């Protein structure tokens, strides 16, 4: 079983739609959780950290369910510029090493 | 914000050539840097952890004699792909962690696209 599993998509949604991505992880010792965004042929960029209490940053809401080992990202009012691959990323606390999911591709259309 | 640079951004070389990639943290010091590789439509895979002043730590399955890492200073790590072959063609990305409002936020370089003919 992969350490981090994501639906690769693509998710094709119209502008203004709400879209949700899920991610499951296998290592219950994982300590920190993040969503990164990666544009085609570019480096990943941190979108937001994910906390058990849930957190929101503008149109983006992230949730963590430790019991189910599950993370989610909700994007409201999608923009064309949200088109990218969204990576679910974990840190198990070992010297800042990150484990990446394969990513979920989002395509927002007119 | 913090910036990590990589050089070169793109390399095309013949099989058997050695290729050196530099990763620099521009406005902070990094005792640790990470090297990743990403094949098309796949996730970033950690290759090794570069440690300033000591040997790099390689992930399982990564040949240390093929991928030479040198952490020359607190702002520079280099990855040398020795005797590159077509199967080494990939997107190589480095990152450096820095404590910020996010726990151990990682700052990524822009990546180096290696094509071995």
Image (cartoon, rainbow, N blue to C red):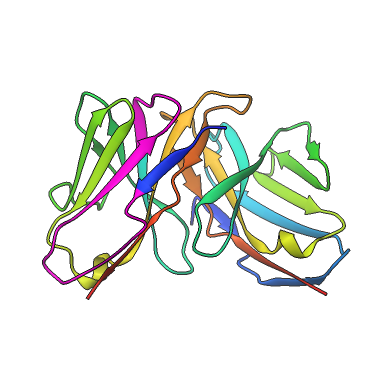
Q: Is residue B110 left or right of residue B60?
A: right
The residue lying at 34 percent from left, 64 percent from top is B90
Q: Is residue A78 left or right of residue B61?
A: right
Name above or below for residue A96 compared with residue B40: above
Q: Does the magenta run of residues contain B22?
A: yes
Name above or below for residue B83 compared with residue A70: below
Q: Nearer the viewer, residue A85 or A8?
A: A85
Q: Position of residue A13 (x, y in %)?
A: 80, 71
Magenta region: which residues?
A: B7-33
The residue lying at 70 percent from left, 55 percent from top is A22
Q: Nearer the viewer, residue A54 or B32?
A: B32
Name above or below for residue A15 compared with residue A86: below
Q: Quadrant of residue B44?
A: bottom left
Q: Quadrant of residue A38?
A: bottom right
Tag count = 0
Q: Position of residue B16 (x, y in %)?
A: 11, 67
The residue lying at 46 percent from left, 31 percent from top is B97
Q: Is residue B48 left or right of residue A100?
A: left
Q: Position of residue B20 (x, y in %)?
A: 21, 51
Q: Nearer the viewer, residue A44 or B76?
A: B76
Q: Position of residue A62 (x, y in %)?
A: 75, 43
Report the quarter where the C terminus of chain A lies. bottom right
Q: Does the magenta run of residues contain B106?
A: no
The residue lying at 72 percent from left, 40 percent from top is A65
């Amino acid at each position: 079983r992969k350490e981090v599993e994501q639906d690769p998509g693509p998710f094709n949604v119209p502008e203004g739609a709400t879209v949700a991505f899920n991610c499951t992880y296998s290592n219950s010792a994982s300590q920190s959780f993040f969503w990164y965004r990666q544009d085609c042929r570019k480096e990943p960029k941190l979108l937001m950290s994910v906390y058990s209490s849930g957190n929101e940053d503008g149109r983006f809401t992230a949730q963590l369910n430790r019991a189910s080992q599950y993370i989610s990202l909700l994007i409201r009012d999608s923009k064309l510029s949200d088109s990218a691959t969204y990576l679910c990323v974990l840190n198990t606390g070992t010297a800042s090493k990150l484990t990446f999911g394969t990513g979920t591709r989002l395509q927002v259309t007119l | 914000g913090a910036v990590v640079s990589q050089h070169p951004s793109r390399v095309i070389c013949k099989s058997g050539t050695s290729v050196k990639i530099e990763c620099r943290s521009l406005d902070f010091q990094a005792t640790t840097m990470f090297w990743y590789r990403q094949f098309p439509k796949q996730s970033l895979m950690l290759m090794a952890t570069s440690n300033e002043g000591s040997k790099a730590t390689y992930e399982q399955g990564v040949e240390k004699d093929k991928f030479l890492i040198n952490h020359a200073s607190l702002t520079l790590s280099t990855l040398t792909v020795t005797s590159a072959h077509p199967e080494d063609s990939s997107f190589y990305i480095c990152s450096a962690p820095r404590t910020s409002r996010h726990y151990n936020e990682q700052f990524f370089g822009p990546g180096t696209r290696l094509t071995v003919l």
